[in-house]
């Protein structure tokens, strides 16, 4: 029997990168930055365009153009598992972690968006919803902020009904408890306070600090040590305060990484980022691993992309409402939604991700 001709062959893949300055200098426990690079890809097929994006580097756009786009030309846009497999094979000699996985993630997300549009379905409906809305936590509180700036940002989120907020720690350990106390004084006793060290502490430093932070009712300690130090994360999980969740996983690029973290019993909550871990296909795979290991899942950054995924993923408990990415998505994407009473609701009235990239508005940020 002859193979059926695709109703939606891939006609083109267009990719570009944009560097958007932050609204003020930012830093965490191990990195400083003044701009964020957004990579946007559009895959055309079946008379429609699928949108994928990620926060990566200009080199990611080049890799998509040179290596991944030729894998798709003329092929069935709806055959996403086949494309995902072939993209992974195409980067075999380049290395899976890092830029290669981020490039695959962007194209995979564009293909899912295109598939949902071809079927005239919101992405959440295509994936199948476990819930209609997902709680968010406000994320920022950079170590470059003054105490006043820290309090203003976290306090505003709480006043808007967001019941969980996260701040960065680790750059100046001697100042961290003072900054946490300032944050707690501003948000009051009713909001949960999360902290993120981005791997800045040693094991014993982190353990000591966790005990002190628990006195200020810190409920979440993210990457207290490097996420590559699974024994250190396990130490913190086993010996840290009972009411404090240990979280990590944002730097996971493949299923093997997440499986090892779960097998090591290194975290109370696993984080995954669909712009890094292989796109929507990869994120759903991580959700399946969380189901198998009975560990909750939380998404990392890119809130507009993760909204339908977290509404579909059974183990998802909340979504990171990250300051930089919220600002960029509100500025450059039509359809980016805002939380109401601390919840983001997946739109039901627009197909796909429900986003449209404002190319004209982004032109001033475009890289050559």
Image (cartoon, rainbow, N blue to C red):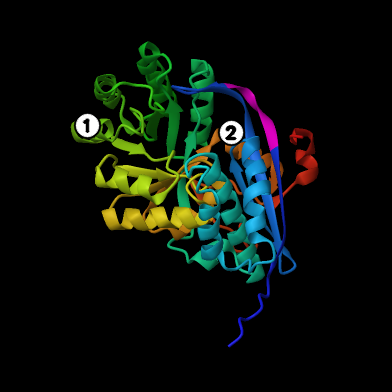
Q: Mark 1 or mark 2, which is nearer to you?
A: 1
* Res 219 seen here: yes
Q: Earlier in the sequence, mark 1 or mark 2?
A: 1
The magenta region covers 18-25
Which part of the image, by quadrant, shows the C terminus? top right
Residue 151 rendering spot, x and y as whole percentages: 49, 23
Q: What SS does tag 1 mark?
A: helix
Residue holding disc 1: 235
Residue found farthest to the front: 93
Q: Are marks 1 and 2 in contact (CB under 8 Å)?
A: no
| Image position of 71 with respect to 76: above or below | above
Q: Quadrant of residue 21?
A: top right
Q: Quadrant of the N terminus?
A: bottom right
Question: Is residue 178 magenta-colored?
Answer: no
Mark 1 Cα shell of 10 Å, populated few (<14), some (14-19), many (≥20): some
Q: Which of these two is toward me, 302 or 1?
A: 1
The quarter of the displayed image where residue 213 is located: top left
User: Which residue appears at 19% of the width and 35% of the height?
Assistant: 238
Residue 174 location (% of width, % of height):
36, 11
Near-viewer residue (92 or 272): 92
- Is residue 126 or residue 107 the one in the foreground? 107
The residue that disc 2 covers is 324
């Amino acid at each position: 029997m002859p193979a059926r001709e695709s109703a939606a062959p891939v006609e083109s893949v267009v990719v570009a990168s944009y560097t958007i300055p932050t609204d003020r200098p930012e830093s965490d426990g191990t990195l400083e930055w003044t701009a964020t690079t957004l990579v946007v890809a559009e895959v055309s097929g079946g008379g429609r365009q699928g949108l994928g994006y990620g926060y990566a580097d200009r080199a990611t756009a080049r890799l998509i153009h040179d290596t991944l786009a030729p894998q798709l030309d003329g092929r069935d846009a709806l055959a996403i598992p086949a494309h995902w497999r072939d993209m992974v094979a195409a980067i075999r000699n380049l290395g899976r972690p890092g830029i290669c996985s981020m490039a695959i993630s962007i194209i995979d997300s564009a293909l899912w968006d295109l598939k949902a549009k071809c079927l005239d379905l919101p992405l959440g409906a295509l994936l199948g919803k476990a819930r209609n809305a997902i709680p968010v936590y406000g994320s920022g509180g950079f170590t470059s902020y003054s105490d006043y700036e820290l309090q203003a940002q976290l306090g505003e989120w709480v006043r808007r009904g967001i019941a969980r907020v996260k701040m960065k720690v680790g750059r100046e350990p001697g100042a961290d408890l003072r900054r946490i106390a300032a944050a707690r004084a501003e948000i009051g006793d009713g909001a949960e306070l999360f902290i993120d060290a981005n791997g800045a502490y040693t094991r014993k430093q982190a353990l000591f600090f966790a005990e002190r932070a628990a006195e200020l009712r810190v409920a979440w300690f993210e990457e207290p040590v490097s996420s590559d130090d699974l024994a250190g994360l396990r130490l913190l999980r086993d010996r840290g305060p009972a009411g404090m969740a240990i979280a990590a996983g944002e730097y996971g690029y493949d299923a093997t990484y997440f499986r090892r973290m779960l097998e090591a019993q290194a975290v109370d909550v696993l984080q995954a980022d669909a712009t890094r871990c292989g796109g929507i296909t990869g994120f759903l795979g991580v959700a399946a691993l969380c189901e198998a290991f009975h560990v909750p899942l939380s998404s990392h950054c890119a809130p507009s992309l993760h909204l339908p995924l977290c509404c579909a993923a059974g183990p998802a408990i909340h979504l990171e409402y990250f300051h930089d990415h919220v600002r960029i998505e509100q500025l450059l994407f039509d359809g980016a939604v805002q939380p109401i009473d601390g919840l983001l609701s997946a739109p039901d009235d627009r197909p796909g991700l429900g986003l449209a990239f404002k190319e004209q508005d982004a032109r001033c940020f475009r890289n050559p």
